[in-house]
Every structure is written in structure tokens, then in C-alpha cells.
Image (cartoon, grey):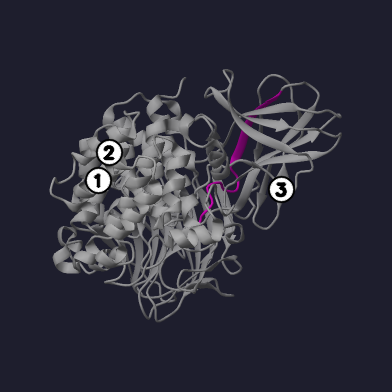
Amino acid sequence: MKIPQYMEAIYASWLGKLMGIRLGAPVENWSSEQIAQAFGRIEDFVVSYPVFGADDDSNGPLYFTRVFDEVGHFDVTLQDMANTMLNVIPKEHGFFWWGGVGISTEHTMYHHLSQGIPPEKSGLAGLNGVELSEQIGGQIFSDGWAYIAYTDTKKAVEWAAMCASISHDGEGIEGAKFVSAAISIAFEETDIFQVIEKAKTHLKADSQYANLIEDILQFYKSHPDSPDKCLQYIKFRYPYCRYGGICPIIPNSAVMLMALCYGKNNFKDTLLICVNAGFDTDCNAGNVGSIMGALVSLEGLYKPWIQEINDTAIASGLLGSVNMTDVMTQSLRFSKMASRLNRLKDHPVLHQTKSTFNFALPYSTQGFLMHKESTIEATLRNIEDSKASCGRALQINIHQRFPQKTFQLIKHTYFRATQIYDARYEPALAPIVWPNQWIRAKMTSQNEDDYEACIMAVDILGNKKRSSWCLLNKDYQEIKMQIPSDFHYVHYIGVEFKCLQRGFLSFITIDEMSVDGEILAEFDFTNMPLEDYGLTFDGGRHQEIAGCSHVEGDWMITKSGCMCDFEQVGHLLWGDIDFSFKWLEIALQDWGIGSEVHLFKQGAKNYMAIQRQKNSELMVYYRSDEIKWQKAFSFDLVNWDNILLRIDCSHTIIKIVINGHTFSLSQFLDLKTGCLGLYKPQQSTLTLNQIKISAY
């Protein structure tokens, strides 16, 4: 079944944004003079990151658009958007630059919302001042609204303006409107000047942003071959010192417009002009890349940069398994919502889980790569293949082979901190594949009797499991293997190949690899690894307990288990947001008054809680931004040390067993999926010793 064009277009636009971010991140906030002094002229990625650390520019579109998942429809309100922000953003770390209230616009917004200031007021210039309210954040997070609205530009602009108004005002909102409008319009246009002119009509005619657009367009018409002169004009007419703040929107938008004009519809040229101009390079190139990706589609992107990205883009929101998803999976999520909103042609690939890996979109790899320890040289290429389930497949080009030598194609399902370039936005990851699940892969060889293959999985402790070897032939055949239930977090999965005879260029083709089935695992938190990501912006050290993310509190691993300082409020998430629990057994070393165990956790604000109230009472409640229902249970339990909490879930009943005491409640709020969480108030204790889990 052919992939609809809109899916490719959204993928191209998202890839374009990620390329721009990657291109600009190493020289963020450098001047054009500093860039020239260091590199002469940037012509390519100046740093080849092993795995690029999360960036706020991509966090925003990926996470803010979750508002549609949370409310279940597209008719969202300003309060809905604000609720989503508080649900998915960790408290004053990760996600954004937390430069201080009154300094960082986003930090100020989070503070206001947390203090109960309504979203209608939280971004107002009258509250925050014009300088703070007209920084660049109004537009750098606006791409996702256009992906989902697709060619409904009016809707894209409406959503972008709403979201930006929670943190920004004035020109900050106009910038959000322009970026979202330009992306939406570019999906149907072929000329960037038509995109700019049409996007301008969605702005206030008397806004400085609209005047800026006209000014840069007129300069271009007078000097169509002089981008350097245009940059000097921008520095004279729109200097940072005129606007103030860390990243004022007008000077940076001027650079974006200059690049769009002088790039003349060429994706690579446009991004290079943008980055070499300096200023807020990752933000500017990210938005420009998104607009240009929508304009030129996949075939117009610069192919070596697609290969460098390799469908890998981790995030640093509160949901560890969302942070671990790849570019194609992220694009399919945008496309699925775009399909629903606009009644576009559906496709089966839109409904696959994040642990189904195929190559349905041109150039997609879903993060697969050749393992560095392979003894045979091989490269990868996405190809059309009518025999593959989605019409495309991943071709492995084996340059030459020697008998009994092996090579491995792998997919990381959990990155270790040491694999990630830096901790600038403090990523926190959870696995997307778990013990006891089944791995299935379909593959074929161009020539029979050249290769044997087996499925493999490796956990973070180095434990490895292989399936039996299978001789490949010209027909697609499925190989499968069950991941051992005694594995720790699954680090990567893949296929190992063995060469059977000497030869030169040959090909193996992978249709898809999928992981499904019941999760059955046990994790000991008394020796859970600590992921050390390195230094943050402010010189602090970012560490997370493996598989966890935290809202707040300094969580640590001790001989007793996972715990948070007695004097702090502690709030922790563990596992996959898509867990559908069958049962859980949670061993707690102690459970202080007021502390809670959370199930079906979808973020900081949405979950079901089991709270210890006092020696003889337990409170169970459900909240979605606010408490929806609660129920108290009284029972005789004096000692709250060494607690064994078991939770059995069915479609209609949740059964809670605490040291032999059983309580049941109807699951009438349609609670289906979510991760596990822990919460403790100040001067209380909660120590997690062990988790046993059965889930899908």
C-alpha cells in the first residue's frame, strides 16, 4: 500500500527541523565573525555527534502537541495546553533553558503556571515586560501545530498563537504565527517567496514582524546576490542591543528571512546561509529547516544530512519512553493526528507501535546501524521493494565477505548516558523493548547459501541472547526469538549475520523487525545503575537512575533501594508510558505517611495514586490535572516497613493487595496505559526495593 504524500511531507519537514538544529547547535549564539574565525565558512555539520543530546527546539513540538492525546479531541483550549505543559515538563530542569524567572521566558512561564496564574495572563507583557515576552521561544516550538494542521493554515496559526501566548506576547506571538503558517503553506507551494508572502497575511499588518518581512524582501530585491550585505544591514537595523534579552525574536527572524530569500529554494544553501549568519543558530536553522523541508519534500533534502541524522532524535521531556523514540516514529505520530483532523488517507503504518520498526518512508532507517564491532564492512540503504510489507525495505550492502566472519545490524532500544553527546537539556530515557517479549524479523538474501542469520538481544549488563541460525534465501522468511525474562533493560536488538563463503558486493534486505508480547521482568533497585550524562549548561552534573525520569527531588540508589532525601519533595517516573499492566509487585523498604505509588502515569499531573494516609487508612484517587475521584480503605496494618504491594489489573477491576490485605475498585475511568511513579512529600519516606511486572 503506497505511502500517502502527506506522510512523506511531514517526515521531510520534521527531518528538516532536526537537521537545522544539528547544524546550528555547536555554534549556538556565536557571531558570524566568530564562526568565520573558527571555520572560515560552515559547509557541513561541524561536529559528528555519536548520539546528539536532546534540544529544546525539538522538545516543544514533540511534547506540546500531546495536548490532543490528553483531551482526546482537537478543540483544545488555552487551559488544555497549559495543563499539558505542566504534565510533560520536569520541574525546573530538562526540556528548556532554565535561566531564571525574569530571565528565561519559559522558566518564567512555568513558574507562573505552577503558582496558579492562568494561562491567559502568564505570558502577558504587562506581567513580564516587553523584552521578556518578545524572545524567540514564541516561534521555535510552533512547528508541530503545522504538522498536524497540515494544509489547514488557519488552524495551524490558531494553535500556534494560543500556545505561544502562554509564554509570550506581542512579536513573540506573531513569530509563532509566521512559522506555523509558513510550514503549512509550504506543504502546497514550490516557491519560497510565495510561502513568505502568504504567511505574512496571517500576521497583524501593523506588527513589527510584518514590517520586518517586507523590509527583508525589499532588501533582497535590491541586492539579490548579496547575502553578506543583507547580514550587515540586519546587524545595523536590528541589533540585539535594540531589543534586549538572551534571544530577541526580531533580529533572529531577520536572519531566518534573509536565509529563506537568498537560499532560493535550495534546502542546503538556505540552511548554510542561516547558520553562518550566527545569532541563535540552532533555533533559526531549526525553523528554517522545517519550512524548507515542507517546501522541497524528501527528495529536496540534502541526502548526506539524512544519513547523518539516521532517524535518531532523543528528547528530554518527562516521559522516558517518548524521549527514546526515533524520527520516523515521531513523524508517524504527527501524521496520524493530521490524518484524523483533515480526513486524509489512512495507512496501516500509522497504527503501528513504537516497537515496530520498518522502513515505510523513503530514506528512513529507524535508527538501525551496523554495530561497530562487526568484522565485515557494510552500509545501509532504504529501497523500494514490492515484496516488503510496506513497499520499502532496508538494504544491507556487504562490500566483501570472508567465510565465518560476522556482522551485526542493531537497533538501540535504550541509550546509555555514555553514548549521548552531552547533557545540555538533560535527557532521561526509558527502554522501549522489555524482557520476555518476542522479536520478529523478516529478511532475504540476494544469493542463496551466502549467509546465515540469527536474532539477537543484548541488555545493559552485557547479557546476550541469540536465536538459532537460519540459512537465508531469496524469499523473505521470518526469524523470531523471545527475550529472556531475566534480562535487565534491553540495550539493543538486531540481527547477526555469518558469511558462508568468500565474495564481493552482495545484498541482504530487511523487511521489518517488530517486538511484541507479554512483558515479564524483575528489577532490583538496590543496585540499579545510575546514568551519568555529564555537565549541564550551568556546570552542574546531570544524573538519572536508569530507566527513570524525575519531576523533582534528588533521587538516589542506596543499599535499601531507590529513595529521595527526607527534606525534599520527591516525584519519580519509571518505565514505559504505553505499559498496559496485567499485574505489578512492588517491594517497598518503607512507606511514609503521605507518600504515594502511582499507576497509569501519563506525566506529572495525570495518574492513579495509592496514598498512605495513616496506619489504618489508604487513599486511592485518580487525577487528570485535578483530582477526579477518590476512595478510602481502612484496614489494620501497624508496620509500614517491608511492604509488598501487589496490583492486579483487568478491564473492569483493579485489585490492590498490601501485605495480604486486599482491596478492589472498579476501573470505571478507562485507565489503560501508563508508567509507574513514586511521590513523597517533604519529611516523609518512600524507598523502592524491587519491581516485578507483567504487562503488554
- Image-quadrant location for residue 616: bottom left
Q: Report whether residue 39 is seen.
A: yes
Bounds of the magenta segment: 429-445
Mark 1 highlights which residue? 213
Looking at the image, which residue is at 28% across and 60% down? 135
Residue 552, horizontal then vertical, whole percent: 39, 69
Q: Report whether residue 622 is seen.
A: no
Residue 444: in magenta span? yes
Identity of the amino acid at label 1?
Ile
Residue 192, horizontal then vertical, whole percent: 33, 35
* Mark 1 surroundings: few (<14), some (14-19) or many (≥20) residues within 10 A: some
Q: Give the answer, above or below, for where 688 lies relative to 315.
A: below
Identity of the amino acid at label 3?
Lys
Q: For this rendering, which residue is in front, 635 or 238?
A: 238
Q: Give the answer, above or below, for where 604 lies relative to 285.
A: below
In the drawing, does residue 208 fall left or right of residue 111? Answer: left
Helix, strand or loop status at disc 2? helix
Residue 330, horizontal then vertical, whole percent: 44, 42
Q: Are marks 1 and 2 in contact (CB under 8 Å)?
A: yes
Helix, strand or loop status at disc 3? loop
Using the numbered discs, state the Cα–Cα distance from disc 1 to disc 2 in whole angstroms.
8 Å
* Mark 2 surroundings: few (<14), some (14-19) or many (≥20) residues within 10 A: many
* Mark 3 surroundings: few (<14), some (14-19) or many (≥20) residues within 10 A: few
Disc number placed over residue 196 in the picture, else none: 2
Mark 3 highlights which residue? 372
Helix, strand or loop status at disc 1? helix
Q: For this rendering, which residue is in front, 238 or 635?
A: 238
